[in-house]
Image (tube, rainbow, N blue to C red):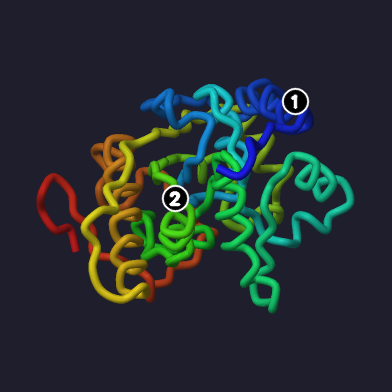
Amino acid sequence: MDESWRVPWVWRALLRFSRVLVPMICRLRVSGAVPDGLRHGPLILAANHVSPVDPVVMTAACSIAGIAPRFMATGGLFDAPVAGWAMRAAGHLRVDRHTAQVTEALPSAAEALRAGSVVLVYPEGRIGLDPWMWPERGKTGVARMAAMSGAPVIPVAQWDTHRVLPYTAPVGIVGSVLRAIRDRPVVYVRFGEPVDLSGLTGTDGARAMRATDRIVEGIARTLEPLRAGEPELPRFVDRTRPVEMSRVRKRRSAGRDQG
């Protein structure tokens, strides 16, 4: 570990504030736990992505769990007038997708991990478009970060955040937020067991792909108890969400392939 990363006061304040804000729009239920020895890093949290409100809900869940992760987030957020200052001051990590600078994201994340950070990343790289809302096939960035840093990976599943904000937010965000304040839907976050990334063979690329499959499968297993009774279509369907089959993955539930 190069040097210990200290959580900035701005991020500590936002973590506390999230525990006041989130109960206004939903009833958050957090389960599972991050082992004490990993809570202060180095650690990678790999989460599914369901709704635009996920980072806000995840911030509150992490605060409840006693961890302060650095989010890997799209570069556009860092360029916004107020949000950009907060993202930089909190120590979050910029990802400039579709630019030449995108190659800097993985080394920066690995360096942050070696400095003792907890880093949260969405392996799907976007809000998932699987028609059944299970995790899509992931990108290999998380696996490469783990290989570069030696940090363990814990899967995190969230569910029903799409009942708070739909896919198309910020379009119609005022109405969505008002409905969420009125209904306060139950939203779930669950921390899973560390993913076993040992015993992988082949080229660097092949190992990264196999590790990615294990990570996403870990997220799916962590998600299963949160959506018991709705293994196919969710009870609540976000009609604004487009459907894309190109990254649908074969999933396994209760020991059986589910297609």
Front in this rendered view, residue 150 or 138? 150
Identify the residue shown where x is 52% and y is 62%.
Answer: 125
Q: Quadrant of the N terminus?
A: top right
Identify the residue shown where x is 65% and y is 67%.
Answer: 104
For marks 2 and 1, give the CA distance: 25 Å
Q: Do the residues under discs 2 and 1 have CB atoms within 8 angstroms?
A: no
Front in this rendered view, residue 210 or 256? 210
Residue with the mark numbered 2: 48
Where is residue 136, by image quadrant? bottom left
Q: Position of residue 183 (x, y in %)?
A: 56, 28
The residue carrying pointer 2 sits among few (fewer than 14), some (14 to 19) or many (20 or more) residues within 10 Å by Cα, namely many
Q: Total number of numbered labels? A: 2
Where is residue 257, by image quadrant? bottom left
Q: Earlier in the sequence, mark 2 or mark 1?
A: 1
Q: Judge whether 190 appears above or below 134 on screen.
A: above
Q: Residue furthest front?
A: 2
Q: Position of residue 117 (x, y in %)?
A: 58, 40
Relative horizontal placement of residue 111, taking residue 27 as reference (left or right) = right
Where is residue 30, by image quadrant? top left
Q: Judge whether 129 appears above or below 119 on screen.
A: below
Identify the residue shown where x is 31% and y is 37%.
Answer: 193
Q: Position of residue 106 (x, y in %)?
A: 57, 62
Q: Residue furthest left?
A: 256
Q: Which mark is residue 207?
A: none
Q: Position of residue 113 (x, y in %)?
A: 55, 47
Q: Which mark is residue 13?
A: 1
Relative horizontal placement of residue 224, taking residue 259 as reference (left or right) = right
